[in-house]
Image (tube, rainbow, N blue to C red):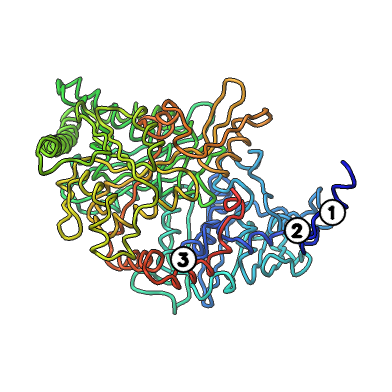
């Protein structure tokens, strides 16, 4: 390279030189951008710290090295979690001379015993960032380790080591690890641990592994009617005990719940489930992987849905119920009290907070394991099986009845001159067994691809032009005069505001499908704001979804995978494509995908992934959502500015650059 390149550089480069480039060391990246590691700095993120430490103790229990865990909440927002497991190693680490392994684990990202699978067959912590992140975001952390009948301790502050590891003396009757920490107010402000939330977390962990006893203690000043000062949780029946408590005195379709567990073949893990169908009340779902809650479900959920649905269809055919072939997974799952827990090696999650399991193999493993047991559950007592099938088919009949009513309304609207549908709408015929869907897409280019990729019988396409009106900051007259909003309201046919009636909705699902970039996220936000303000009952009824188109296409030889984002891409390169030369293509928009790719990744119900947008049932939480929408999308720009200032450090710089 010629020296002239450096000598003739323009003077406008200013102060941008080598000294401008920051290199963050140790745990400094965590404190700079906690949102990358725990999803933010709100209450949920604060309690995620507790979950990270508790997960480590649970991993010891699941691996068979601990049978007791204690969670202690003290005044001053101080939390201690201890177990009687093996204890973190305290000898000098071979790669870090002069440092104990304990210090390396607490002060170094991506360090731990869960990468090779030698120390833990299955674990909730995978990336070696859990306890080090807790340490980085705590004003004070103390770790005590009892190993080989000796007690050791080391202390930290905001990720920095306060001194060498200390040997405190003999501990003949103690073993295991205790992590005690106080979240840093510089990061979390005045947020405090909620005793009821931690109490519930500790109790749920005991249900997830029958071989562990969890002891709860809290300061008397933090106890309440719902949270005792002391409690002990041990549930030999696992999820079955949890389900029995959840059901209580409610009547169910079957007197006996569908519960059980099964090891996966080739030592790939195991699955445990507990399912019941209450008669006169709604149910709930709880999904777990390696004792970690995955509230957004994922591939293990898909496996259970497939197993229950296919088994009920087969049972219907066996008993002469030909209509059972029309059953869908939603018919089977809706209204059920459903709990599923899997233990698998090297699970893949959608994010560091592990809200959704994405391991492809989990779906097949769960389906194969559960299917045989559910077949037996139905056929071992034919009357029980018929009762359950009858209940599920009643739900199916109700769904088909609503669908038929919508088809009639659709045809009426299409034929009536006064109710002409918007010209940009490419409607579906509504024929066949599939539920109908309206895809709201961004621009004519994406609309063209979507029209070619869709199922003409069940999927309708409505392109919108650019960013729609922000209804949170617009007057009622301006909203009524907006063409894009008028077209959308006309296509849906259910009315707005106080006149909104989800029963009049012309489709079973409304799916927002925008590009996987910042502009696409902005358009999706504006659309969600529209639905929240103008059609809140549609959102509350669970009709609104977000599509998840991929951002990257990864290829190596005959292997092709799609990645949702940068984190998913890194994950695939470290697992599926490890050691291979990967060809990476980036989709700038949905319009760049050919129809086959768009169908496979984003529109086909068998292969796509959707996120359902819902509103909380509790009045207080609904008010909080409205307040947040008003603050971020309303007329006062100062509120948005203040929010951005307060949360700027949570944003991943790589995402901005992308």
What quarter of the picture does the N terminus occupy? Answer: top right
Give the number of marks: 3
Disc 2 on helix, strand or loop?
Answer: loop
Q: Is residue 598 above or below residue 493?
A: above
How far is mark 3 from mark 2, CA to CA?
Answer: 33 Å
Q: Which residue is mark 1?
A: 97
Q: As drawn, is 228 to the left or to the right of 592?
A: left
Q: Nearer the viewer, residue 478 or 348?
A: 478
Disc 3 on helix, strand or loop?
Answer: helix
How far is mark 2 from mark 1, CA to CA?
Answer: 29 Å
Residue 40, numbered circle: none
Q: Which residue is mark 2?
A: 21
The percent coordinates of residue 483 (x first, y second) are: 27, 51
Residue at the spot 41% in from the left edge and 65% down from the top edge: 632
Q: Nearer the viewer, mark 2 or mark 1?
A: 2
Q: Nearer the viewer, mark 3 or mark 1?
A: 3
Residue at the spot 80% in from the left edge and 61% down from the top edge: 19
């Amino acid at each position: 390279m010629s020296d002239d390149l450096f000598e003739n550089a323009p003077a406008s480069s200013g102060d941008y030189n080598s000294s401008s480039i920051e290199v963050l060391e140790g745990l400094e990246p965590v404190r700079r951008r906690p949102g990358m590691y725990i999803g933010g700095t709100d209450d949920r993120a604060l309690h995620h710290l507790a979950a990270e430490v508790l997960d480590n103790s649970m991993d010891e229990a699941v691996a068979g090295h601990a049978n007791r865990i204690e969670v202690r909440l003290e005044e001053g927002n101080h939390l201690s979690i201890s177990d009687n497991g093996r204890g973190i190693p305290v000898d000098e680490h071979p790669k870090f001379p002069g440092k104990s392994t304990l210090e390396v684990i607490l002060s170094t990202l991506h360090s731990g015993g869960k990468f090779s699978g030698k120390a833990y067959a299955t674990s909730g912590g995978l990336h070696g960032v859990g306890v080090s992140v807790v340490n980085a975001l705590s004003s004070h952390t103390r770790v005590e380790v009892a190993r080989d009948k000796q007690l050791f301790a080391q202390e930290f502050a905001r990720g920095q080591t306060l001194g060498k590891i200390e040997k405190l003396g003999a501990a003949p009757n103690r073993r295991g690890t205790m992590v005690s920490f106080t979240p840093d107010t510089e990061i979390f402000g005045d947020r405090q641990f909620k005793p009821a939330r931690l109490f519930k977390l500790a109790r749920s962990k005991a249900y997830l592994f029958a071989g562990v006893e969890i002891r709860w203690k809290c300061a008397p000043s933090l106890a309440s009617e719902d949270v005792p000062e002391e409690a002990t949780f041990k549930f030999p029946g696992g999820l079955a005990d949890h389900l029995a408590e959840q059901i209580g005195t409610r009547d169910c379709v079957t007197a006996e719940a569908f519960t059980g567990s099964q090891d996966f073949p080739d030592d790939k893990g195991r699955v445990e489930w507990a399912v019941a169908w209450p008669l006169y009340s709604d149910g709930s779902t709880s999904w777990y992987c390696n004792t970690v809650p995955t509230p957004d479900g994922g591939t293990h959920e898909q496996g259970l849905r497939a197993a229950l649905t296919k088994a009920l269809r087969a049972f219907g055919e066996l008993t002469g119920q030909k209509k059972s072939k029309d059953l869908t997974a939603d018919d089977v799952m809706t209204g059920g009290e459903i709990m599923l827990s899997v233990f698998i090696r090297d699970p893949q999650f959608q994010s560091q907070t592990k809200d959704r399991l994405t391991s492809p193999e989990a779906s097949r493993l769960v389906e194969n394991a559960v299917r045989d047991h559910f077949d037996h559950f139905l056929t071992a007592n034919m009357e029980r099986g018929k009762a359950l099938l009858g209940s599920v088919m009643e739900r199916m009949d109700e769904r088909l009845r609503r669908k038929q009513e919508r088809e009639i309304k659709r045809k009426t609207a299409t034929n009536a001159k006064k109710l002409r549908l918007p010209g940009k709408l490419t409607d579906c015929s509504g024929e066949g067994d599939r539920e109908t869907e309206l895809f709201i897409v961004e621009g004519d280019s994406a609309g063209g691809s979507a029209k070619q990729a869709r199922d003409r019988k069940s999927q309708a396409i409505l392109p919108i032009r650019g960013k729609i009106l922000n209804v949170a900051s617009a007057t009622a007259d301006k909203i009524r005069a907006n063409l894009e909003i008028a077209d959308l309201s006309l296509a849906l046919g259910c009315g707005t505001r106080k006149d909104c009636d989800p029963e009049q909705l012309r489709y079973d699902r409304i799916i927002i499908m925008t590009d996987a970039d910042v502009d696409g996220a902005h358009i999706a936000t504006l659309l969600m704001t529209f639905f929240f303000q103008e059609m809140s009952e549609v959102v509350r009824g669970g009709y609104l979804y977000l599509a998840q188109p991929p951002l990257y296409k990864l290829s190596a030889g005959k292997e092709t995978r799609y990645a949702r984002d940068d984190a998913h891409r890194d994950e695939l390169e470290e697992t599926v494509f490890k050691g291979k030369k990967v060809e990476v293509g980036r989709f700038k928009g949905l319009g760049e995908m050919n129809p086959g790719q768009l169908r496979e990744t984003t529109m086909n119900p068998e292969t796509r992934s959707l996120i359902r947008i819902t509103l909380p049932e509790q009045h207080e939480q609904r008010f909080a959502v409205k307040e947040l929408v008003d603050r971020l999308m309303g007329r006062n720009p100062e509120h948005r500015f203040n929010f951005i200032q307060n949360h700027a450090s949570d944003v991943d710089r790589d995402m901005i650059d992308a």
